[in-house]
Image (cartoon, coloured by chain):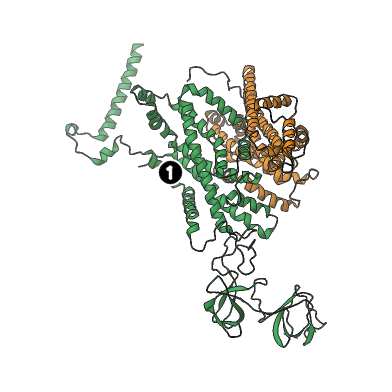
């Protein structure tokens, strides 16, 4: 028995010895070197256990790797800045101003989106009927209608064309439109001119075979492009841009049905909606953190707060939102209040759960034994663990609040129309959705809203991922 | 389990009582116009007589007690503006069936869409379905439902060649509302199922099954999916809440004569008693949904224990 054991251990010893010899001999440590003082070597110093890991730097490094999220942060930043500077940019229409046509006084309702006010342009030397505009210096109204005939007035056609017919009326020549709207009375062979004709409708005689009007109303042109003749007629000096408004500033996103500028309203609405979002997120964070910390840290409150949580959590949030908005006067503060009433719940519960987990860890116990005050433990030991979750929830609260606002406005409990918000813009646009030409009034606010909400959602999630230390791959 | 069920039921009842009290007291703070169909024309004596008749001049605790007493007999009071004098319970009884039908259909549809989507996402991590599903989930979660419902209604009705409004007899018109209502839950099912399945797939028993040479398909269906589905049960009640809230908007959008549309209607007409009744009913649905979810979890997953662990805290 013994011999076997001895022989086995002898074998093992031998094996170890050979291993030591082969492996250590490779290192070839010189006997003298073992006892020589080492010089300070920076590289070797780095090699030791020192780590320059910083939580926040790693978080940002990981976040910056997510190109989409970084791009969206940029988009949001630009959008945010733009909503604030937009009213101060030159040539903006106030969001609540009802824009009227300077000539007819009618509201410029449902004007299609357009990047320019130029409707058409007239070549140099075109004769036009011009009149200076009262309140707008430097602008003239122009058109090329020389005469307006009552329905069934007779005139002579002296030259026939598919679109325009040259006519003579009371010794003057001009052009009339030949289309389904004028329905000229024509003989069997309309090209055999001249002949007498009439229309069953009111008909305009134009100076040129071109319509230089905006569906009947005059166009605007800058005065320096015109030479005013003695007979009240003006001639264009150069190619003149004929505009529908005495302004170079167009309604980029069109106007709504009472002539308000949709562009200005959308940015004003984005401002309101973002304000609601940020306000709700902020209150949610403040209330949620406070209650969550109390709930998790103060054992006596645990029972009570759990019951309160269960009661509120049992009611659908939407119902609370509707109820509060119904009872209180509609307005910004009501909306924010109603959304905050339920928003803190999720935050508080999460913080409570996390605090329950980490409050009795050894380092906190040690802290308490050393006499650290409770406030300091909470602020310095507990909350830093939760920063990522808090920011995530805040980032997600913003699109949530904006969405709730849209919903509440639809139900009819939202903001009044003179406070534009993305919610009431979308609601206004929704009513016109059946008519394809007015659909832009829904599409534009929806695009802005989607960009804002999706950006916040993706950024929030990307940040939460980045803030998770598991994703901090340490490379140096 | 029985003890837990009874306790859970009792706490639900207490919650319900608290909610009814709060809703009742809050709605008594509303202006009294909401109780009259012709407030502007009525004189002070008529108003007072009507208030007296409705019992609104009593102190609030007495009113609440009377309300609760009537509630036990299934009497929710009478409508004051929406349909003057008609008992609310009757109005709702007429409207509820269609809401229930739509709700059940959309919950079924969301399960049918959400589960395959979630499974496909988990199986092909990083591949087409995963990317598609992620995009879908981000879209549904980020963009307010109020917005995409409009577009579903607009383009869906054109594509199907039907009217934009709901018609109970034409089953084609059921498609769009049911589909709209199911989207929110579909996204949440897919998201959670994917997460749970990926978690399960990394566990040791799956590796063992693979080592044993079990077909990948079988591992997925009878190991991963079954285990991943258990925690999903708790999202079914949440999905019920989603559906309920979605129904408020969808029903009014498609003019569906259901309860959700009714709520929007009576809010517009400031009918206090109706608002009160419907809000209470919706809260009930919420409570019952969560209660069922909790009980269902206990029945399905034997690992969950309802006995409080002492000493852990």
Identify which residue is drawn at 63% across, 73% down.
A218
Residue A150, position as x, y percentages in the image: 76, 77
Residue B238, compared with residue A186, is above or below; it is above
Quadrant of the rendered structure where residue A184 is? bottom right
Residue A475, compared with residue A96, is above or below; it is above
Quarter of the N terminus of chain B within the rendering:
top right
Residue A457 visible in rendering: no
Quadrant of the rendered structure where residue A197 is? bottom right
Residue B238 visible in rendering: yes
> For the view shown, which residue lies furthest in the right direction?
A188
Q: Nearer the viewer, residue A395 or A228?
A: A228
Label total for image: 1
Of the chain colours in the picture, the one used for chain A is: green
Instruction: Spot the orange chain and give its letter.
Output: B
Chain ID at mark 1: A
Q: Nearer the viewer, residue A53 or A125?
A: A125
Q: Secondary structure at mark 1?
A: helix
Residue B3, position as x, y percentages in the image: 63, 17
Image side of residue A424 versus residue A353, left or right: right
Identify which residue is drawn at 75% across, 48% down.
B165
Quadrant of the rendered structure where residue B125 is? top right
Residue A474, position as x, y percentages in the image: 38, 39
Residue B73, position as x, y percentages in the image: 75, 25
Residue A136, compared with residue B166, is above or below; it is below
What residue is pinned by disc 1? A62
Q: Residues within 10 Å of mark 1 (few under 14, many from 20)?
A: many
């Amino acid at each position: 028995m013994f011999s076997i054991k001895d022989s086995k251990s002898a074998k093992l010893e031998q094996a170890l010895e050979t291993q030591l010899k082969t492996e250590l001999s490779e290192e070839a440590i010189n006997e003298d070197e073992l006892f020589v003082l080492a010089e300070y070597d920076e590289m070797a110093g780095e090699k030791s256990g020192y780590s320059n890991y910083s939580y926040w730097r790693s978080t940002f490094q990981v976040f910056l790797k997510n190109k989409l999220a970084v791009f969206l942060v940029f988009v949001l930043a630009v959008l945010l800045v733009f909503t604030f500077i937009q009213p101060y940019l030159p040539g903006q229409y106030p969001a609540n101003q009802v824009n009227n046509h300077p000539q007819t006084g009618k509201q410029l309702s449902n004007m299609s989106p357009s990047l320019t006010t130029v409707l058409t342009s007239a070549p140099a030397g075109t004769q036009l009927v011009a009149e200076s505009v009262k309140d707008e210096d430097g602008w003239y109204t122009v058109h090329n209608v020389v005469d307006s005939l009552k329905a069934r007035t007779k005139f002579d056609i002296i030259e026939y064309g598919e679109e325009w017919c040259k006519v003579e009326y009371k010794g003057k020549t001009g052009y009339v439109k030949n289309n389904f709207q004028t329905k000229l009375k024509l003989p069997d062979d309309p090209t055999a001119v001249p002949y007498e004709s009439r229309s069953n409708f009111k008909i305009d005689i134009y100076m040129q075979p071109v319509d230089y009007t905006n569906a009947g109303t005059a166009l605007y042109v800058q005065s320096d492009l015109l030479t005013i003749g003695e007979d009240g007629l003006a001639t264009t000096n150069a190619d003149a841009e004929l505009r529908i408004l005495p302004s170079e500033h167009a309604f980029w996103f069109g106007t709504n049905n009472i002539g308000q500028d949709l562009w200005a309203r959308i940015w004003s609405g984005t401002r309101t909606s973002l304000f609601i979002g940020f306000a709700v997120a902020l209150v949610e964070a403040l209330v949620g953190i406070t209650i969550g910390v109390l709930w998790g840290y103060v054992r006596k409150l645990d029972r009570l707060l759990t019951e309160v949580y269960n009661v509120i959590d049992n009611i659908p949030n939407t119902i609370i939102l509707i109820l509060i908005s119904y009872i209180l006067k509609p307005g910004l503060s009501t909306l924010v209040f109603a959304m905050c009433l339920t928003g803190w719940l999720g935050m508080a519960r999460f913080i409570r759960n996390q605090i329950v987990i980490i409050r009795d860890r050894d380092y906190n116990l040690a802290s308490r034994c050393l006499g650290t005050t409770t406030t300091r433990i909470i602020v310095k030991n507990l909350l830093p663990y939760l920063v990522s979750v808090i920011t995530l929830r805040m980032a997600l609260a913003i699109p949530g609040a904006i969405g709730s606002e849209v919903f509440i406005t639809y139900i009819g409990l939202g903001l009044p129309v003179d406070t534009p918000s993305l919610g009431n813009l979308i609601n206004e646009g929704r009513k016109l959705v059946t008519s394809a030409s007015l659909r832009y009034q829904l599409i534009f606010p929806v695009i802005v809203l989607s960009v804002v909400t999706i950006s916040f959602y993706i950024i929030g999630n990307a940040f939460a991922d980045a803030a998770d230390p598991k994703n901090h791959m340490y490379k140096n | 389990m029985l003890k837990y069920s009874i306790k859970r039921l009792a706490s639900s009842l207490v919650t319900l009582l608290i909610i009814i009290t709060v809703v009742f007291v809050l709605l008594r703070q509303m202006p009294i116009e909401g109780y009259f169909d012709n407030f502007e024309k009525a004189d002070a004596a008529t108003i007072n007589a009507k208030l007296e008749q409705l019992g609104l001049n009593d102190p609030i605790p007495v009113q609440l007690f009377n309300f609760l007493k009537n509630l036990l007999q299934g009497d929710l009071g009478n409508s004051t503006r929406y349909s003057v004098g008609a008992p609310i319970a009757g109005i709702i009884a007429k409207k509820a069936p269609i809401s229930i039908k739509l709700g059940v259909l959309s919950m079924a549809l969301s399960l049918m869409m959400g589960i395959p989507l979630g499974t496909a996402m988990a199986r092909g991590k990083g591949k087409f379905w995963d990317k598609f599903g992620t995009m879908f989930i981000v879209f549904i979660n980020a963009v307010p439902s109020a917005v995409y419902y409009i577009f579903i209604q607009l383009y869906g009705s054109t594509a199907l060649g039907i009217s934009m409004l709901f018609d109970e007899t034409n089953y084609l018109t059921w498609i769009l509302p049911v589909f709209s209502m199911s989207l929110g839950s579909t996204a949440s099912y897919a998201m959670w199922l994917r997460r749970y399945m990926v978690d399960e797939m990394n566990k040791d028993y799956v590796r063992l099954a693979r080592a044993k040479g079990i077909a990948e398909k079988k591992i997925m269906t009878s190991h991963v999916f079954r285990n991943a589905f258990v925690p999903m049960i708790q999202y079914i009640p949440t999905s019920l809440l989603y559906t309920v809230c979605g129904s408020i908007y969808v029903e009014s959008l498609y003019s569906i004569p259901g309860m959700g549309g009714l709520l929007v209607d009576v809010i517009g007409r400031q009918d206090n008693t109706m608002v009160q009744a419907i809000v209470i009913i919706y809260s009930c649905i919420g409570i019952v949904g969560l209660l069922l979810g909790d009980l269902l979890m206990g029945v399905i997953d034997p690992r969950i224990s309802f006995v409080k662990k002492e000493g852990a805290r």
